[in-house]
Amino acid sequence: MARPIGATAPRVDLGIRLRYLRNSAGLTLEEVAKSLDGLSYDQLRRIEVGQSSFRSVGDLRKVLGLYGVAGDVELVSALEELQKTPPSQDWMTQYRSVSDATKSFAGIESAAQEVHAYHPNVILGLLQTEEYAWAQFREVQPIEETTSEFIEGNVALRMKRREPFLAEEHPTKLWVILGEAALRHPVGDASVMLGQYEELLRVAALPHVTLQVLLTDVPGRRLWSNFTILDLGKGKPTTVTVDTGWGPVSMSDKPANVSRFRRWFSTMTASAQTPEETPEIIEKLKREKR
């Protein structure tokens, strides 16, 4: 089991468990919303992604009754404790300037035991140095019209998210495919890029990390948008998230969607350079920057 960032945010943990129970009951969110008075689809969706909680324990019990687990005293008690946990105990509350969608993703990611990610155009946040992350946000600040507080909060959260993957004991497994364009696109000045290349070499050497590069001129099928597959372990729903212009808001744990992106990842793994070739590619890029 990977070392958590602190503790999985209670609301995120509750949402993950509820999604698993709903899927096990063979129900969609739409069906649950239609079956229960006082709980809308939007409310249930926000609860499942850790952005909200039930207004009362009674609402939680109604949902658990629909899922057929109301008689499991131990389970119900554990979920009620999560529901009752004050928001102040949620480690993500400190990141007030970060969007709800990003915090939801970070919360679910913190519960993952293994992460597979594909980033064709920009280096994955979990692999970024602090300098690279700052430069990336500053690069688009005039367009996005973001505040300095927004950038500071997002960079801080991005660095915090790295901790389970860099832990000395029981680190989270990470397998990343980066597009060549992600490595070549200049973010910040030459010193920022050189520092980022050094960090990639360091992380790629870790035994629990697999890093591959998909070269631009290599033939083969590929997607052009970022996606991440979060394996939450036995008894919890594997979740896939696709980045959009609005942020990491397209999230699904439907088996058909997860299987689709697993196939894409497997396909691009076969087309990418082997992990053993990654250091040579990065070293070449370092030489070009000097």
Image (cartoon, rainbow, N blue to C red):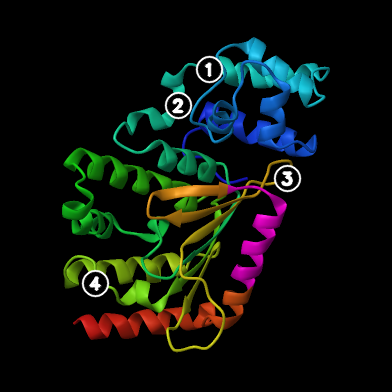
Give how far apart the Cα atoms at labels 2 and 3 are. Answer: 24 Å
Point out the tag, 2 or 3, that comes first from the N-terminus: 2
Give me the residue at 24% from left, 85% from top: 288
Mark 3 falls on what kind of element? loop
* Residue labelled with disc 1: 85
Highlighted magenta segment, given as a residue range: 252-266
Q: Amino acid at mark 4?
A: Pro
Q: CA distance from mark 2 to mark 1?
A: 8 Å
Q: In the rendered structure, are the residues bearing label 2 and label 1 in contact, judged by CB atoms less than 8 Å apart?
A: yes
The answer to the question of whether label 4 and label 2 lie on touching residues, with beta carbons closer than 8 A, is no
Marks 3 and 1, how far apart at CA: 24 Å
N-term mark: 3 or 1: 1
Marks 4 & 3, CB-CB < 8 Å contact: no
Check disc 2: other Cα within 10 Å, few if <14, some if 14-19, many if 20+.
some
Residue occupying the point 55% across, 52% down: 172
Q: Amino acid at mark 3?
A: Lys
Residue assigned mark 2: 90
